[in-house]
Image (cartoon, grey):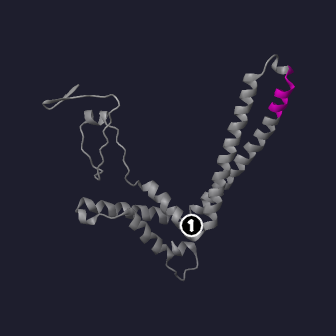
Amino acid sequence: MVKIGEKWLDYSDGFRVILASRSSDIKMSPSEKGMVGMVNFTVTRSGLEGKLLSIIINQEKPEIEEKKSLCLQKEESLKILMADLEKNLLDLLANSTGNILENIELINNLNETKVKSVEIQKSLEDSKQLQQDLDEQRNVYRPLANKGAYLFIQINDLQKLNNIYRFSLAHFIRLFQKSINVEQSIRSIEEKL
C-alpha cells in the first residue's frame, strides 16, 4: 500500500505510468527527473539534416543513394556471415574431443574460416572505401540540407511566441521537396545550391 494524498492505494512492482506531452519544455525538479525516464521525440537538427540530405540525393542523384543503400546492405550481410563463421568455429572447438591438433576436420575448418575471413575483411575494406567515396559525393549537397534543417528549427521556434505558428514537419518536408523540384536553367550544382 502507498498513501497518495489522503487515500491508501494498492502498489504493484510492475506498475508503470506513461505521460505524454506536446511540450518539449517540461519543468521538473532534479529529484523528479531522477525518478522519470524522459524520451524526447522532438526533431534534432542533425537528424533533420540527414533526412533532408537523403531527400535531395534521391531527387538529384538517386543512383548515389541506391549505391549507398546496397553498400550498407552488403556490409551488414558480410558482418553477419563473419559472425556465423566465428560461431561455427567456436562450436567446433567446444564440441571437439581429444587432442585438438590431431582433429583434421577442425584444422580444415579453421583454415577455411581463415581464408573466408580474409576475403570478408577485404570486402569490408572495399565497402568502407566505396562508402567514403559516396559520402564525398553526397557532401556536395550537405550545405543545402544544413540550411533547410536550420530553417525548420527557426520556424519551429516561432511557436514559442504564439501557438498559431505551429508547423508540421511533414508539411515542411513537402515544401522542401517542392522547392528542389523547381526546374531552373542552371548549369552547375554550385549555382543551384
Rendered residue at 73%/48% (across/down): 123
Kindly indicate the quadrant of the structure image that contains residue 158.
Answer: bottom left
- Whether residue 69 is visible to the viewer of this picture, yes or no, is yes
Whether 45 is among the magenta residues is no
- Horizontal side of residue 66 vs 96, given as left or right: left
Of all residues shown, which one is farthest toward the bottom?
A: 185
Instruction: Name above or below for residue 97 compared with residue 7.
Output: above
- Image quarter where the N terminus lies is top left
Query: Residue farthest to the top?
Result: 98
Helix, strand or loop at label 1? It is helix
Residue at image x 46%, y 74%? Answer: 178
Q: In the rendered image, which residue does mark 1 sit on?
A: 58
The quarter of the picture where residue 115 lies is top right
Q: Position of residue 16 (x, y in %)?
A: 33, 36
Instruction: Find residue 141 and report its horizontal and vertical position in percent.
Output: 54, 65
Find out whether residue 103 is within the magenta segment. yes
Magenta stretch, overall SS: helix
Residue 43 x, y percent position in the rendering: 39, 55
Q: Pick whichever, 53 or 185, lies toward us.
A: 53
Whether residue 142 appears in this view of the structure is no
Residue at 12% across, 30% down: 6
Q: Residue furthest left?
A: 6
Left of 175 or right of it: where is 59? right
The range drawn in magenta is: 102-111
Q: Amino acid at mark 1?
A: Asn
The residue nearer to you, when weighing 100 against 51, is 100
> Viewed as shown, does residue 149 lie left or right of 73?
left
Quarter of the view holding residue 60 = bottom right
